[in-house]
Image (tube, helix red, strand yellow):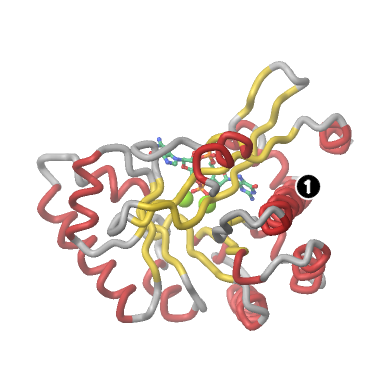
């Protein structure tokens, strides 16, 4: 009820954070991230409310609201002849457990006439903890329909590598905690070895790597050297309102 009222009052905002191709220094996509403009007074970050909505299952409404907004924008950009980048949308596990999830998501995207290849679904490793076989089936179905699949926060779970073998993936997002370690004098050497192997392993599997939480130029240089294709982080841009994204990044 609470959530419904907030949705009707238009309190949810979708922000976009650009993904930068660091080999060529150009934008190549964006991630959609939810914000709650609580009673139009205070902007709440996801950690303040997502856990509650996950607990009661209403997170599904948030995820679908974000997908609707993203598709509406992609349609508008296409109609205006503007540049189109793939946009990623986060899906919670609650969402994947919904009946008819594949046709629901496909239905939303198709209602805007948006090319499936422009939508990437991000799932975290922890999403996969239970019910794995079923979730892998769902991801395969989404992928068959031309959507992209991304593994978020890679490396933080305990089954990262096992999952790599089973999940149909287009993108692997290296968790910020690894990207942070590039800056730590003590661990720098080891972390470079770990990152190099994650990145080359991904490449051999035909999977793109995105480095999350890239805040400093030193990290960009290291990542570029290691062959990582894409970075997302405050060094390039924080998540910003859609309007600002359009002004800065759309042609
Ligand atoms: P995530 O999907 O891993 O998103 C990346 C988070 O890292 C975002 O936090 C982003 O603002 C933050 N970030 C990006 N670059 C940097 C950086 O350079 N430094 C630092 N310190 N942080 C950076 P945000 O927007 O607070 O979102 C947190 C999490 O909430 C997301 O993590 C995602 O798991 C969840 N979330 C956000 N929107 C949605 C949504 O629509 N649906 C669902 N199910 N989850 C969402
Ligand atoms: Mg994400
Ligand atoms: Mg992440």
Looking at this view, is 42 or 16 the one in front?
16
Give percent across and percent down for residue 58. 78, 47
Left or right of residue 223: residue 91: right
Taking the image as drawn, is residue 11 in sight? Answer: yes
Quadrant including the N terminus: top right
Above or below, 13 relative to 146: above
* Residue at the image point whose x is 55% and y is 66% from the top: 128
Asked whether the viewer can see residue 57, the reply is no
80 to 169, vertically: above or below: above
- Of residues 76 and 202, the one drawn nearer to the viewer in this rendering: 76
Q: Is residue 206 left or right of residue 44?
A: left
- Place of residue 132 in the rendered image (x, y in percent of width and height, measured from the top left): 58, 74
Q: Nearer the viewer, residue 86 or 190?
A: 86
Say if 48 sits above or below 91 in the image: above
Residue 8 vs residue 196: left or right? right
Which residue reaches farthest top?
41
Write down the residue under mark 1. 58
Is 42 left or right of 237, judged from the image as shown? Answer: right
Which element type, helix, strand or loop, lies under badge 1?
A: loop
How many numbered marks, from 0 up? 1
Q: Tell me which corner region of the image, top left, top right, bottom left or bottom right, holds residue 111.
A: bottom right
Kindly identify the residue that appears in the image at 62 percent across and 64 percent down.
119
Q: Is mark 1 within 8 Å of ligand 1?
A: no
């Amino acid at each position: 009820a609470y959530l419904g009222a907030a949705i009707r009052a238009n309190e949810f905002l979708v922000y976009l954070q650009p993904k930068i191709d660091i080999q060529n220094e150009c934008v190549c996509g964006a991630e959609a991230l939810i914000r709650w403009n609580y009673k139009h007074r205070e902007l709440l970050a996801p950690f303040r409310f997502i856990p509650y909505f996950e607990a009661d299952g209403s997170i599904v409404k948030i995820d679908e609201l974000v997908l609707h907004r993203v598709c509406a924008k992609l349609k508008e950009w296409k109609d205006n002849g503007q540049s189109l980048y793939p946009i990623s949308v986060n899906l919670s596990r609650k969402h994947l457990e919904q009946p008819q999830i594949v046709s629901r998501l496909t239905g939303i995207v198709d209602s805007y006439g948006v090319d499936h290849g422009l939508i990437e679904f991000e799932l975290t490793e922890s999403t996969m903890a239970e019910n794995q076989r079923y979730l892998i089936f769902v991801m395969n179905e989404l992928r068959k329909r031309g959507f992209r699949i991304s593994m978020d926060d890679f490396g933080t779970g305990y089954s990262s590598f096992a999952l790599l073998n089973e999940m149909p993936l287009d993108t692997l997002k290296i968790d910020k905690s690894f990207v942070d370690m590039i800056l730590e004098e003590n661990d720098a050497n080891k972390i470079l070895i770990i990152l190099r192997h994650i990145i080359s392993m991904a490449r051999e599997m035909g999977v793109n790597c995105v480095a999350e939480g890239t805040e400093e130029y030193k990290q960009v240089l290291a990542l570029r050297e290691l062959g990582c294709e894409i970075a997302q982080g405050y060094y390039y841009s924080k998540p910003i309102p859609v309007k600002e994204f359009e002004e800065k990044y759309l042609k």
